[in-house]
Image (spheres, rainbow, N blue to C red):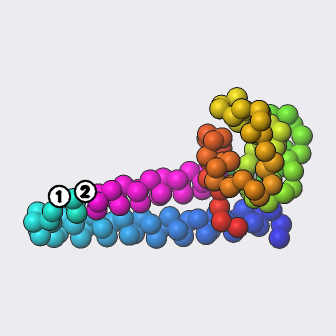
């Protein structure tokens, strides 16, 4: 599949999840406020319900951020900048783009950025599959923080 198509596809899919999530959040709020029995609930129940909702809200936030990343990637595509590392200007590895469709950094630069955060050199293991995508991306704040399920 063309990468641009893939991005658009991803965007639609994400948009749908966001809409669904928004709907379900709204329903939860309405149900709880209409339901007077809420006051009879055990505080722990209420707390866990609040926790669930907060988790959902956090998830929604993450999805919206991802959508923003995808829109950015589409913009870069339009400008012919897609797939070019924003740091060193080299082409980003196709396998990496395959996994992190909206990434703006090549493996080398992402790895360097990561090393600057916390990583001791001996932990500099390969990015190929062995490591969870989530683990990798969460550490690169702002950009690749959330990978999708491919
Ligand atoms: Zn680079």
Q: Nearer the viewer, residue 101 or 114?
A: 114
Element assignment for label 2? helix
- Decide: is 14 above or below 147: below
Q: Is residue 148 above or below residue 93?
A: below
Callout 2: few (<14), some (14-19), or many (20+) C-alpha neighbours within 10 Å? Answer: few
**Residue pictured at 39% horizontal, 69% vertical:** 23
Q: Is residue 135 left or right of residue 57?
A: right
Q: Position of residue 112 (x, y in %)?
A: 77, 33
Q: Main secondary structure of the magenta part?
A: helix
Vertical position of residue 26 compared to residue 121: above or below: below
Name the residue tied to disc 2.
47
- Which residue bears the numbered disc 1? 43
Look at the picture and state if 13 lies above or below 100. Answer: below
* Distance of label 2 from label 1 (alpha carbons): 6 Å
- Residue 111 in view in this figure: no
Tell me the quarter of the picture where residue 37 sits.
bottom left
Magenta segment boundaries in residue numbering: 48-71
| Residue occupying the point 50% across, 64% down | 18
Residue 60 coordinates in the image, percent (x, y) = 47, 58
Q: Residue at x 77, y 32 (%)?
A: 121
Tell me, yes or no, whether the highlighted magenta stretch contains residue 76: no
Most extreme residue toward the front is: 122
Going by the image, does 41 lie left or right of 142? left
Query: Which quarter of the figure has residue 1?
Result: bottom right
Task: For the residues labelled 2 and 1, say whether their Cβ atoms are less than 8 Å apart.
Answer: yes
Task: Choose between 145 and 80: the one closer to the eye.
Answer: 145
Q: Is mark 1 within 8 Å of ligand 1?
A: no
Q: Look at 38% across and 69% down and name the residue there.
A: 24
Q: Can residue 38 be seen?
A: yes
Q: Position of residue 26 (x, y in %)?
A: 33, 66
């Amino acid at each position: 599949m063309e990468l641009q198509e893939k991005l658009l596809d991803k965007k639609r899919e994400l948009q749908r999840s966001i809409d669904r999530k928004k709907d379900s959040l709204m329903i939860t709020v309405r149900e709880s406020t209409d339901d007077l029995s809420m006051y009879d609930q055990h505080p722990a129940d209420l707390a866990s319900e609040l926790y669930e909702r907060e988790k959902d809200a956090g998830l929604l936030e993450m999805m919206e951020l991802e959508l923003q990343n995808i829109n950015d990637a589409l913009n870069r595509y339009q400008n012919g900048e897609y797939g070019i590392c924003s740091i060193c200007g080299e082409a980003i590895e196709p396998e990496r783009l395959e996994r992190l469709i909206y990434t703006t950094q090549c493996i080398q630069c992402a790895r360097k950025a990561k090393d600057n955060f916390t990583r001791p050199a001996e932990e500099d293991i390969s990015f190929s599959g062995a490591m969870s995508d989530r683990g990798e991306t969460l550490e690169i704040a702002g950009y690749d923080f959330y990978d999708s399920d491919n």
